[in-house]
Image: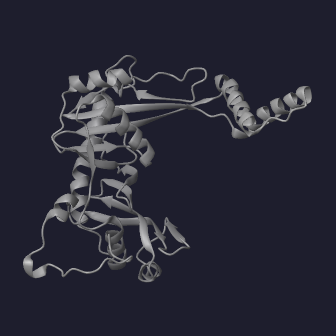
Amino acid sequence: MFKNVMVYKLGGAWTATWEQIEEALGTQRFEECGPTQERSAGWVPPRGEEHGPLVESVGGQYLLRLMVESKAVPASVVKRKADERAQQIEATTGRKPGKKEIRDLREEAKQALLPVAFTKRGATWVWIDLQARRFVVDAGSQNRVDEILSLLVKVLDGFAVQEVHTATSATAAMSEWLSSQEPPAGFSIDRECELKATDASKAAIRYAHHPLDIEEIRQHIAEGKLPTKLAMTWDERVSFVLTESMQLRKLQFQDGVFEKTSQEKEDSFDADAAISTGEISRLLPGLLEALGGEIELVAAVETPLPAAAAPTAQPDTEDAPF
């Protein structure tokens, strides 16, 4: 069910009942692209049942599913069609179309091609955990998260999320774990990582299916390269790749987590949802603890320094930290 995890905190005291969320999402139900429509996004029943509810509640966890359909018309085809039309205009009128007219011709060509363009669909899981105050999206890009948040903000009164901040950055923690070869309690280091230089070269070194307890990696870190990805396993139950922005990618549940049962096929959704959300709900607190725990940036800024530790005023400089 979940292949990636981007986690946020539910903002403020926002809460809503199943009925309120279901009614709100009903105004954004997915519809297929029209003949000349390039893209359409909306909510679909998580169980895949036609006309089913748009919100599923499993063990108190709310699950949503956003469907996005898009049409792609190759730019080269649009350009060729527009160029052909421009040549016809020049041949019949003796006038060469200007830049603005060329842009209009390309838009006309695209609109003419859209009705016969192939469509592509992709669905994204969304999980709302009101008890733990978490908002989780199964996405690998910030653009998809932003789109989902924009849709929800429009229909859910008071809905907002906040980024999760930890005392230690993922990059700093991964550097320490690789250098010391001492992963945090409950976790193990697997066989994949990426290191990037911080200078203008942005040189990257990737290891795949390779042991990471080698001097070469420690040397790269000592020379200033920073980990941006690191494959790990939690409690021998869930494997993932931790990124510098604290995303979890390539999520995989280990053998034995999803035990075979005698449930009928139509009941497997509940079991899969309960197991997936249950395992991730236990993984996330352990990961946050490994990163030094959550911190509130506003609180940290607003807390005054003790009088004895307060710094003396310094003139502003271009190199001053921010």
Indicate left or right for 278 with 49 as reference: left
For the view shown, which residue lies furthest in the front direction?
315
State the residue at coordinates (51%, 22%).
32
- The residue at 41%/45% (across/down) is 139
For the residue pair 288 and 303, the one nearer the viewer reads as 303
Of residues 262 and 116, the one drawn nearer to the viewer in this rendering:
116
Asked if residue 300 lies left or right of residue 138, the reply is left
Q: Residue furthest left?
A: 307
Task: For the C terminus, give its image quadrant.
Answer: bottom left
The image quarter containing residue 183 is bottom left
Task: Quadrant for residue 268, please give it.
Answer: top left
**Residue at figure coordinates x 13%, y 65% from the top left:** 303
Q: Is residue 242 shown to the viewer in this render?
A: yes
Q: Position of residue 174 (x, y in %)?
A: 35, 69
Residue 104 is left or right of residue 284, and the answer is: right
Q: Position of residue 263 (x, y in %)?
A: 29, 28
- x, y percent for residue 212: 43, 73
Give coordinates of residue 178: x percent, y percent: 37, 74
Q: Nearer the viewer, residue 162 or 64?
A: 162
What residue do we see at 26% from left, 54% from top?
Answer: 164
Q: Judge from the rendering whether residue 112 lies leftward or rightward of residue 190; answer left or right.
A: right
- Looking at the picture, does residue 6 appear above or below residue 86? below
